[in-house]
Image: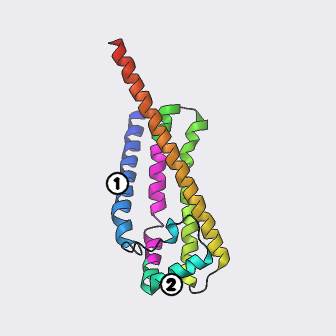
């Protein structure tokens, strides 16, 4: 039974990794609202924004850019959080179980990526609402979206820091075990 679970986990991790790579290197660059315009920073990429920022961005995008942004948000960015969320979850689960075995206090850190997913969805829904009501800008929706964006980035930073620390510790333990094996021989 355990062998089957390991194979299933490896399969799920492999599929989530491949999905993540397809989104990151193909779908997002291809369908982003402005993949080649360096001077435009979409709301998803900002830590914070104001109603004036939203109005200026949407005006700068123009009708075609807003349509592309809406398409991107609905068809790409509503799936992407699940893809990266599960990839981070499986990566952290693997590393944290190697480090802490059954210590639930630390293994629960694997759930941090779902904070990113939650706030990314709130951000996306806010962006879609704002795009659909433009040129009217609802300040409450902007505020909710901006808080969600900030929260998403905070959870992203926490996830990446946790992942880096876990990788570092797993590598250090592996190197340490190699040194012990070398000294015994």
Expressed as whole percent of the image width and height from the top left, the position of residue 65 reads 43, 81
Q: What is the quadrant of the C terminus in the image? A: top left
* Magenta region includes residue 122: no
Q: Residues within 10 Å of mark 1 (few under 14, many from 20)?
A: some
- Residue 172, relative to residue 119: is it above or below? above
Q: Residue at x 43, y 71 (%)?
A: 75
Boundaries of the magenta span: 69-93
- Residue 6, relative to residue 41: is it above or below? above
For the view shown, which residue lies furthest in the front direction? 39
Q: Residue at x 41, y 43 (%)?
A: 9
Would you say 119 lies left or right of 27 here?
A: right
Work out whether residue 57 or residue 136 is closer to the camera in this orientation and state it: 57
Determine the image quadrant of residue 39.
Answer: bottom left
Q: What is the quadrant of the N terminus in the image? A: top left
Expressed as whole percent of the image width and height from the top left, the position of residue 42 reads 48, 71
Would you say 3 lies left or right of 44 here?
A: left
Which element type, helix, strand or loop, lies under badge 1? helix
Which element type, helix, strand or loop, lies under badge 2? helix
Q: Which residue is mark 2?
A: 59
Q: Residue at x 36, y 18 (%)?
A: 181
Work out whether residue 27 or residue 166 is closer to the camera in this orientation and state it: 166
Determine the image quadrant of residue 173.
Answer: top left
- Residue 164, visible in the rendered structure: yes
Q: Residues within 10 Å of mark 2 (few under 14, many from 20)?
A: some
Q: Which residue is mark 1?
A: 18
Eye-nearest disc, 1 or 2 = 2
Expressed as whole percent of the image width and height from the top left, the position of residue 145 reads 60, 69
Expressed as whole percent of the image width and height from the top left, the position of residue 167 reads 44, 39
Work out whether residue 37 or residue 114 is closer to the camera in this orientation and state it: 37
How many marks can you see? 2
């Amino acid at each position: 039974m355990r062998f089957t679970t390991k194979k299933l986990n490896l399969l799920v991790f492999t599929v989530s990794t491949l999905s993540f790579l397809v989104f990151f290197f193909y779908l997002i660059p291809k369908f982003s609202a402005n993949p080649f315009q360096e001077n435009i920073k979409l709301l998803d990429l900002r830590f914070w924004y104001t109603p004036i920022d939203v109005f200026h961005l949407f005006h700068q995008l123009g009708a075609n850019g807003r349509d592309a942004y809406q398409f991107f948000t609905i068809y790409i960015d509503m799936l992407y959080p699940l893809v990266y969320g599960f990839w981070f979850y499986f990566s952290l689960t693997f590393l944290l179980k190697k480090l802490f075995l059954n210590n639930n206090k630390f293994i629960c850190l694997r759930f941090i990526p779902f904070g990113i997913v939650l706030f990314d969805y709130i951000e996306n829904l806010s962006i879609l609402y704002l795009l659909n009501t433009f040129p009217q800008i609802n300040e409450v929706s902007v505020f909710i979206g901006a808080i969600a964006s900030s929260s998403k980035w905070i959870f992203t930073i926490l996830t990446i820091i946790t992942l880096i620390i876990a990788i570092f510790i797993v590598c250090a333990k592996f190197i340490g075990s190699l040194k012990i094996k070398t000294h015994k021989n």
